[in-house]
Image: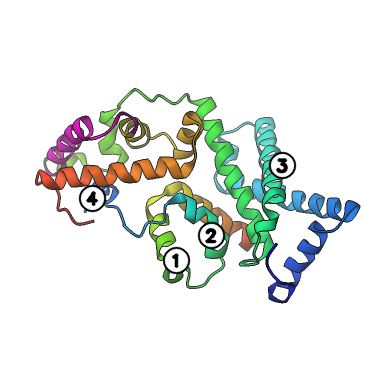
Amino acid sequence: MSATAATLDPETSRWLRALCADGAERESGYARLHARLLRTVYGELHRRGAHSRIAGPELEDLAHEAAADALVSIRRRLPEFRGESRFTTWAYKFAIFEVSAKLGRHYRRAQPVSLDAEEWDRLPGNFNLDPARQNEWRELVAALREAVDTSLSEHQRRVFAAIVLNAVPLDALVQELGTNRNAIYKTLYDVRRKLRARLAADGHLTGDE
Amino acid sequence: MNELERFLTTDPQDSLCGQTMEILHVFVEETDAAALHPGVAAHLESCPPCAEDCEGLRAAVRDD
């Protein structure tokens, strides 16, 4: 790693000494780190309410797999650690990312992702549009639908339908399309800009972002 | 502005997921994180998965 010992807090220094040592000391360090990652994964699964959606043994498998995969990422990326945060903060980040990825995979397995259906009826509910004030948003939704039909590429339309209409979690769509979160988010970002520009050009919204 | 209009509003400062994920560990430790990393702050406002990860990392650090 490129951080100098002088800039590191004592605990971070201890972690790095252990993980950069030889043989048994290093493996002992990684074993301790794995235990911390597993605890972090369980804590995060609990915080996200996963216990109510995933059965015990499956949840245990998911947790152990997430901790193991986080450890693999940390081993691979340890040379990139620059001491900009405590070591454990940097390491726990990988555990949190793995929880997101594993929950996305679980959602996709439990509830197959449809990329073709466009459930427009769900849109008002997904955006908490008040049915009693339908006269205020009905025209905007109709214009949005036309803009989706005429302005988006096939890929953009599928991502829009999955996330915005069908409420598929972004990380589940990542798994379904075999891509990464940034790619899906960027597609959706471009979709939002494109649709707003179109709706503004047609007088349904202002053009300001 | 209703939630649909907010969804259609993008922030040109938005750092997207890649850059946000890259520095999330730094972001959660800084006391003035939003001012130091406005692009990340803008992204967390409009990306629920990254916002969830940020909350999770804050909780993990707090409970450590």
| Kind of residue at badge 3 | Ala
Residue at mark 3: chain: A
| Kind of residue at badge 4 | Asn
SS under mark 3: helix
- Label 4 vs 2, first from the N-terminus: 4
Image marks 1 and 2: residues in contact by CB distance under 8 Å = yes
Residue at mark 1: chain: B
Q: Where is residue B19 in the image (x, y as percent from the top left)?
A: 48, 55
Numbered disc in front, either 2 or 3: 2
Image marks 2 and 3: residues in contact by CB distance under 8 Å = no
Q: Residue B1 carries which label?
A: none
Q: Residue at x 81, y 49 (%)?
A: A31
Find residue B40 and report its image quarter: bottom left
Q: Is residue A39 visible?
A: no
| Kind of residue at badge 2 | Ile
In three-dimensional space, the C-alpha distance between marks 1 and 3, rounded to whole angstroms, equals: 31 Å
Front residue of this view, candidates A113 and B38: B38
Disc 1: which residue? B37
Disc 4: which residue? B2
For the residues beneath circles 1 and 2, the answer to whether they share a chain is: yes
Segment tinted magenta in the rendering: A136-155
Q: Is residue B6 visible?
A: yes
Q: Which mark is residue A68?
A: 3
| Kind of residue at badge 1 | His
Numbered disc in front, either 4 or 3: 3
| The C terminus of chain A sits in image quarter | bottom left
Find residue B1 and report its image quarter: bottom left
Front residue of this view, candidates A191 and A38: A191
Residue at mark 2: chain: B
Q: Residue B23 carries which label?
A: 2
Residue sticking out furthest to the bottom: A6
